[in-house]
Image (cartoon, rainbow, N blue to C red):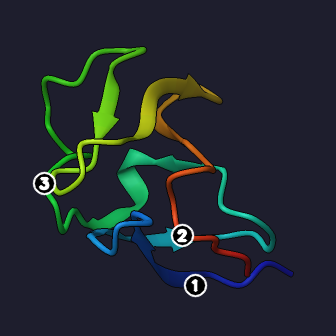
């Protein structure tokens, strides 16, 4: 049975980006925007986000994600090279 976990998502520069409710075990690859509990940096929950738009860290300006549809839900596909590793 899957267990919900609240995780902190951070850029490699140390900037806190979001608190996210993760349902499955394993590496964090995508974030469904509706499961973001707190958008700490104000970069994910902008209502004007378009599909394929790049999301950048406000501190270092590196690409942290792209907006895509996954399973019919708007999601942030994370750039694994720029996010602090998260494994649950």
Q: Pinpoint residue 9: horizontal percent, then vertical percent.
A: 43, 70
Q: Pinpoint residue 29: horizontal percent, then vertical percent.
A: 66, 51
Q: Is residue 44 shown left or right of residue 71?
A: left
Of the residues under marks 3 and 1, which one precedes in the sequence? 1
Q: Is residue 22 shown left or right of residue 87?
A: left
CA gap, disc 3 to disc 2? 18 Å
Q: Pinpoint residue 41: horizontal percent, then vertical percent.
A: 16, 61
**Residue at (44%, 38%) from the top-left corner?**
65
Which residue is identified by label 2? 84
- Residue 84 to residue 28: above or below: below
- The front one of 19 and 59 is 59
- Residue 41 to residue 34: above or below: below
Image quadrant where one finds the C terminus: bottom right
Neighbor class of circle 1 (other Cα within 10 Å; few <14, some 14-19, many 20+) is: few
- The front one of 21 and 42 is 42
Which residue is identified by label 1? 5
CA gap, disc 3 to disc 1? 21 Å
Task: Please identify the quarter of the rendering in which residue 13 is found.
Answer: bottom left
Task: Please identify the quarter of the rendering in which residue 66 is found.
Answer: top left
Q: Is residue 43 shown left or right of residue 10?
A: left
Which residue is identified by label 3? 42
Closer to the observer: label 3 or label 2?
2
């Amino acid at each position: 049975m899957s267990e919900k976990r609240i995780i902190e998502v951070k850029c490699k520069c140390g900037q806190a980006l979001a608190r996210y409710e993760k349902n499955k075990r394993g590496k964090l690859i995508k974030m469904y925007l509706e499961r973001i509990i707190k958008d700490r940096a104000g970069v994910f929950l902008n209502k004007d986000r378009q599909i394929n738009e790049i999301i950048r860290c406000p501190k270092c300006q590196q690409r942290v994600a792209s907006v895509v549809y996954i399973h019919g839900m708007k999601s942030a596909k994370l750039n694994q090279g720029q996010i602090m590793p998260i494994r649950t």
